[in-house]
């Protein structure tokens, strides 16, 4: 008979601590904050009408647009390179 190790009493338990808000990691004077403030003023109604949720994981089209613009602003034109960065 094989006895399984008791993992509950293991004393080497580590917990990963992440900030609750990712915004805390971005400096106050970073260009992404200015870009986000400018892009918040745009009208996204046409973008939302062309966006289809069928067969996709729902992502905010406004957020995806912001990511694309930020990538273009930093010279990243490839979606794969944008994902890596």
Image (cartoon, grey):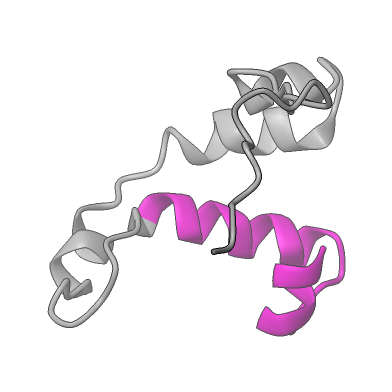
Q: Is residue 63 above or below residue 35?
A: below
Quadrant of residue 24 within the rendered picture: top right
Q: Is residue 68 magenta?
A: yes
- Which corner quadrant holds the C terminus? bottom right
Considering the image in quadrants, where does the N terminus appear? Answer: bottom right
- Residue drawn at (85%, 28%), measured in percent from left and top? 30
The span picked out in magenta is 62-85
Q: Nearer the viewer, residue 41 or 67?
A: 67
> Measuring 66% from the left and 38% from the top, which residue is drawn there?
35
Q: Quadrant of residue 26?
A: top right
Task: Name the foreground residue: 41 vs 11.
Answer: 11
Residue that extends furthest to the front in the rendered view of this protein: 1
Residue 5 in picture, x, y percent from top left: 66, 45
At which x and y percent is residue 61?
Answer: 35, 59
Residue 59 falls left or right of residue 30: left
- Image coordinates of residue 71 in percent, x first then y, are 74, 63
Residue 53, quarter of the rendered image? bottom left
Is residue 60 found left or right of 13 in the rendered image?
Answer: left
Identify the main secondary structure in magenta.
helix
């Amino acid at each position: 008979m094989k006895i399984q190790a008791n993992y509950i009493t293991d004393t080497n338990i580590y917990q990963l601590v992440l900030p609750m808000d990712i915004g805390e990691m971005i400096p106050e004077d970073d260009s992404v904050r200015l870009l986000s403030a400018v892009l918040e003023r745009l009208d996204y109604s046409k973008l939302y009408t062309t966006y289809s949720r069928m067969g996709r994981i729902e992502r905010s089209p406004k957020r995806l647009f912001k990511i694309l613009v930020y990538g273009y602003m930093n010279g990243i034109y490839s979606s794969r390179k944008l994902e890596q960065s």
